[in-house]
Amino acid sequence: MKSIGFRFLMVGLMTVLMFIPLFLAGEVIDDRADYSRETIRTLGEEWGGAQLISGPQIVIPVKGPVTRTEKREVVVRENGQNVTKLQDVEVTRVERKSPIYAYPDAFQMALTTTSEERARGIFNVPVFVAEADISARFDFEAIAEAAHSDETILWDEAQLRVTLRSNKALRGAAELRADGRRVPMEPLTTTHQAGIRADLGDPREISNFALTLGFNGAGRFEVTPVGRDTTLEMASDWPHPSFSGTFLPTEREVREDGFTASWTIPHLARALPQIARHDADPEARNLSAFGVTFYQPNDFYQKAYRAASHGILFIALTFLTVLLIEDRTGRGTHPVQYIFIGLAQSIFVLLMVAYAEQIGFGAAYAISAGATIALLTAFGYMGLKLGLRSLVLGVMLIVLYAVLYLILRSTDYALIAGATLAFAALAGTMYLTRNENWYGEPGSTLIDWLNGTTNPKPAIPPQEAGPQGAT
């Protein structure tokens, strides 16, 4: 019989070998997760995709004198003759110049979203339907001061623009009112951005603009703080918001049936020009956007991958339990049997993913863990000949898989739970083996086994030897 020290080393080697099936199981989980993410992305894009609203912004053309240097043919007198030459001549014309881009003094938005689910194959993809009510007021006196004294503002050609991430998401109501008067809107075609525009005519007598937009979306919703004072209030039935972007909510309340949040952003908090002769919208979209990601917390692919990453710990604890309760007076557990145990626990992860795709995480975990526990307990009784000690193995497995379930359910406490379990297992093993003779009986050490001298036959006592030459 080999020493307990040798058995521990063998179990350690078997545990290291189990990294291979766990790694392969992790690769399968990654492939399924990638397929799921691609399905969610494509269906989300078809529904409307992530949305970003930037604006409203008023754009007013300007014309004024522009002086340029041009090549002109000029007749000059040289040596008593008229000679035609090309010379640089300054020419002044009245042309269109860079327009004035103005953001509102006050910008308010009230947004409500309602979640839905769309199915594709075995996957359910969460999407949302949203309605935004926007109110904006502009300071036209300040806008007028943005033009030079020799320039003319073409007020009658003023446009109001709102840029979006995608026009295809627009659904239902899309209405602009200027002091209660309805203004028709058209798709924005003059820039490389998606969006909508409205020809306002002379807007100087308009005190308030009200815009209502209905649209579909998936994954994320963002807004740019275009107002000198920006206020956003959002209400949704999605219970897992992840607030992101440049600004976090001033107030928020997250409940099981949804969330509410509000943002109040003064102009000093964002580095955007209120009135400029260049378009600051790309800058606003890239540097100042804020909003909400409709987060799916801890989905079963994440749980399965973390189960695989914790798998080596649970395999090691199972091996250790078998080692401590096996009958050391017999033949012990063969390395192949340890491999069987490790493979069963590696396949548990794949079982959990396969069933979770069909029936959800909770039921899939119960079925997969129950089948694995029953298989290993029966194997301990019949294959390892543990007898009633297989009940100890079964109880230990129930505890392990219960702890693993708690670890997978709580992302925040996964590390502390796993580390505590590992420490407790090590402490328990150190206590249970405190009186072990790690070198084993004489002739049963690892070096003796490697030298082929294990369990040598005892010498025959001299007094029991027969006469020389006796048969």
Image (cartoon, helix red, strand yellow):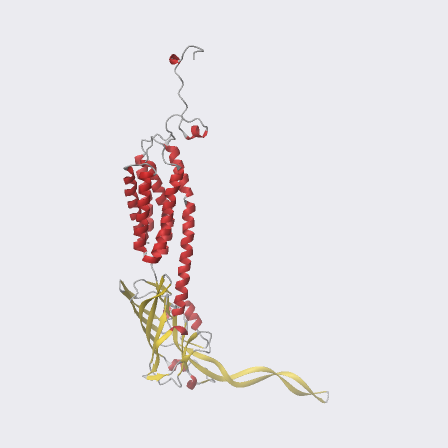
What is the quadrant of residue 211 in the picture?
bottom left
The percent position of residue 328, horizontal first and vertical second, equals 34, 32
- Of residue 16 and residue 233, the one placed in the foreground of this image is 16
Q: Is residue 60 visible?
A: yes
What is the quadrant of residue 248 in the picture?
bottom left
The percent position of residue 359, horizontal first and vertical second, equals 32, 57
Q: Is residue 446 left or right of residue 395?
A: right
Q: Quadrant of the N terminus?
A: top left
The residue at 36%/51% (across/down) is 351
- Of residue 7 and residue 109, the one placed in the foreground of this image is 7
Q: Quadrant of the C terminus?
A: top left
The percent position of residue 407, horizontal first and vertical second, equals 31, 51
- Of residue 100 and residue 169, the one placed in the foreground of this image is 169
The percent position of residue 330, horizontal first and vertical second, equals 34, 31
Residue farthest along the front direction in this orientation? 471
The residue at 39%/38% (across/down) is 11
The image shows a total of numbered marks equal to 0
Residue 346 sits above or below residue 196 on the image: above
Residue 337 sits above or below residue 48 on the image: above
The residue at 49%/83% (across/down) is 96
Residue farthest along the right direction in this orientation? 79
Residue farthest along the top direction in this orientation? 467
Q: Is residue 420 visible?
A: no
The residue at 52%/83% (across/down) is 66
Residue 331 sits above or below residue 209 on the image: above
